[in-house]
Image (spheres, grey):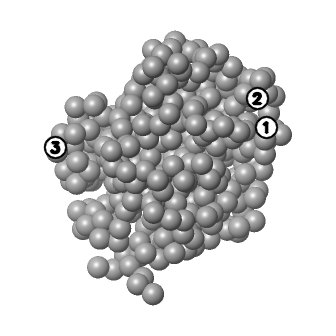
Amino acid sequence: MTWNPLKIGKYTIPLPIVQGGMGVGLSWDQLAGTVSSCGALGTISAVGTGYYEKGRYAKLVNGRPLRPENLNSPEALKMIFKKARMICGQAPLACNILYALNNYGQIVQDACEAGANMIVTGAGLPLDLPEFTKGYPDVALVPIVSSSRALNIICKRWLKRYNRLPDAIVLEGPLSGGHLGFSKEQIVDPAYKLEQLLPDVVATRNEFGDFPIIAAGGIWTHEDITGLLALGADGVQLATRFIGTFECDASMAQKQALIDATPADIAIIDSPVGHPGRALHSELFKRIEREQAPKIACISNCVAPCQQGMGARKVGFCIADRLSDTQFATDPTLGLYFTGAYGYRIEKLERVKHVIASLVGDKA
């Protein structure tokens, strides 16, 4: 099967492979820049940039960025894009921004100013995303959905309010890492497998236009990709597999945790964001079970659904603090380690170019 380039808005990506955005600190300049330099699409996460270069671009209190404007630092985001451009030149770069973030609209504008070619948004329906990119007509908009119903809602709202459609969508299935757009029951229900969801989403897309569909969740091999392209996807997105690369911005603690992981170590968790998530059942959750969890202070006030720590107290952890501890704490044992369903398949670190060659089917 011959693979076509992936066309998103005015941009053409030679390979139909997208590296998923991973915050806090997993997909910044090194990973995204390298992926784009290899002919795929690199994605910079705008989440938690206040920790970039040890908080150089943010005001910290007790080592934590103070309020959302420091947690998601515009100055740091600009520097991340600048350094990624030093790696990939003018190749397209995407920016992933969680819709649940308190200062979402401002971060979208910051990403446009930093030089993002595309905005990718999940963790909620970004019904007002075009509002924040009016001054940047060349920036492609790519919402993440988990159903044909969600796609239908977005398309109708965008057409009515903004007279535009998405430039592409990511269809994220229940095998993804991080936050999931499914209930715990749906995650294990075969009816919600990515391969089952895709045909309905293709049909809904066809009602509105011909923008590309990028399938995501549980994709690991060349054969996985060819199977989804045959079902109607125009491209695929992978995130967890890129953690197992030398170029990934993640800490060695994060990488080693996945290298050491077994299938039994990967669990579905409750999150302050209000969605189930997939992560390693790490020391953090063992401490929560023993009622010895770290104190929740809500210095950064990261996501709106948490309501300044109320959601965190319900599940036993602050997501901003625990994700940052995975990457930046001297002792990362209390960090939150998000992973896709197949994170345990990482056995050693590889170069990004070798991962992409494997995905393309290059056996050399």
Q: What element does badge 1 sit on?
A: loop
- Residue 68, quarter of picture: top right
In percent of width and height, residue 185 lies at: 22, 31
Q: Residue at x 31, y 61 (%)?
A: 233
- The first of marks 3 and 2 along the sequence is 2
Q: Residue at x 67, y 23 (%)?
A: 300
In percent of width and height, residue 67 lies at: 71, 22
Q: Nearer the viewer, residue 195 or 189?
A: 189
Q: Nearer the viewer, mark 1 or mark 3?
A: 1
Q: What element does badge 2 sit on?
A: loop
Amino acid type indicated by mark 3: Ala
In percent of width and height, residue 329 lies at: 69, 37
Residue pointed to by mark 2: 63
Q: Nearer the viewer, mark 1 or mark 2?
A: 2
Residue 55: which disc?
1
Amino acid type indicated by mark 2: Gly
Relative side of 126 to 299, left or right: left
- The first of marks 1 and 3 along the sequence is 1
Crowding at mark 1 (Cα within 10 Å: few <14, some 14-19, many 20+): some
- Residue 342, quarter of picture: bottom left
Residue pointed to by mark 3: 191
Q: Are marks 1 and 2 in contact (CB under 8 Å)?
A: yes
- The first of marks 1 and 2 along the sequence is 1
